[in-house]
Image (spheres, rainbow, N blue to C red):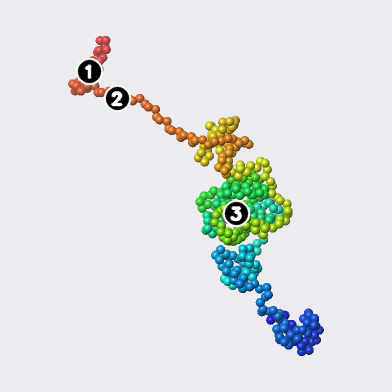
Amino acid sequence: MTQAERDRLVALKKAKKKLITQKQAADELGITERHVRRLLRELKRRGDKVVAHGLRGLPSNRRISADTKQEAISILSYPVYRGFGPTLAAEYLAKKHDIDVSRETLRQWMMDAKLWRARKQRVEKVHEWRPRRSRIGELVQWDTSDHDWLEGRGDEMLLINMIDDATSRWFAHFVKSDSTGENMNHLEQYVKMYGRPLGYYTDKASLFQTAVKTKRDGSRKGKDRQELPPTQIGRALQELGIPWIAAHSPQAKGRVERGFSTAQDRLVKGMRVAGVTTLEAANHYLETDFLPWVNATLAVAPANPDDAHRPLEKHHDLAAILSHVEKRRVNNDYTFPLDAKTYRIARQDVCAGLRGSYIRVEQRRDGSVAARFGDRYLRVERCDQRPKATPAKPAKTKASKPASKRSAWLDTFDLKKSPKIWQATRESGRKREIL
């Protein structure tokens, strides 16, 4: 019995003992005198229980039957519904099994059946959120999640997601790898569907920012950050006229991070129930089931109905912009190297100033190669690798003549019997005088 019911009982007993009139009791209880007389009659018959509601302790007339409760608990005990919370479980019971039950009732059932454990309420640190942008397309958060989306039923895959900051609208796609090509494909699909946003908000991954090279165990603090060339995605965003904004922490781009948290719960369980095992089936479920639910349930209306997206212009060649671009120097024979291959410029496209100049080489996503000199594209073809220069052979020298044989007269020459040098000199002088 509550305190209010005890107070009502005291007033009724005073009226019964004639300590106060029935009118005074009615004024104190806030009821009519007729109702006071009715309660006094019930007080004689039922006693103190007259102040309590007559249905207290009795089952509700709107109570769900025990068979329905047992059926719901049996369904949620299947392995496919492992980890489902009361809210998600209530949605699936209504959609797939025609069991309409509120999430709070289902929460009590699941707690009684040990299928759900209530979380302790805790006060977290209060963080003032950044206000949303006012228009759709002013800022789009872009990130990738490498969660185990198929729970081991298939190959590993990643989810690339772009969430509009003003509306929380999703634009997501499953891919095989977090590569530059896959992100460029996703960017192309977005700008073709909605246009060019006023800015992209991402983390500082190497896809968007060139990392500063430092020595091992070195620090970047206190050093002037040198201007580094942009990455391929950074260059593409510059050519599309879309500013890139770097987030300094995961909390800074919390909208896309919380979106991944929702997907890692609901999307994983939804694909488990649908029996998804391949990348193609995952994208089909994402586009036909999950994204419509997200954009209809979690998305909000922008403060300003104006669309900030800008259309693509005629000079925005997506095939050229969203490609791998490098600069190459034209050789004297009008060839240039690319990925250990040699390409030759067509003779009819050779022009003045081309030899020795740098050209823009685009490796398209379809595998083709395009070269541009200034504003004009050149026709190129792959040629065989030039043969390596062989070292020149040394010139043949004439063979030296063999040494002549030693004279035989030396064999009979006797140094002791031969004349002295002075004698030979004198004899030689005498001969000259005779001559």
Look at the numbered disc 3 and give the secondary structure of its residue.
Answer: helix
Q: Is residue 11 visible?
A: no
Q: CA distance from mark 3 to mark 1?
A: 124 Å
> Quadrant where the C terminus lies?
top left
Q: CA distance from mark 3 to mark 2?
A: 92 Å
In this figure, which residue is indicated by the disc labeled 2? 402
Q: Residues within 10 Å of mark 2 (few under 14, many from 20)?
A: few
In this figure, which residue is indicated by the disc labeled 1? 423
In this figure, which residue is indicated by the disc labeled 3? 284
Q: Is residue 425 visible?
A: yes
Q: Position of residue 275 (x, y in %)?
A: 56, 59
Q: As rendered, which of 199 and 376 lies closer to the eye?
A: 376
Of pointers 3 and 2, the one earlier in the residue sequence: 3
Q: Quadrant of residue 370?
A: top right
Q: Residue furthest left?
A: 417
Q: Residues within 10 Å of mark 3 (few under 14, many from 20)?
A: some
Look at the numbered disc 1 and give the secondary structure of its residue.
Answer: helix
Look at the numbered disc 2 and give the secondary structure of its residue.
Answer: loop
Q: Position of residue 69 (x, y in %)?
A: 61, 71
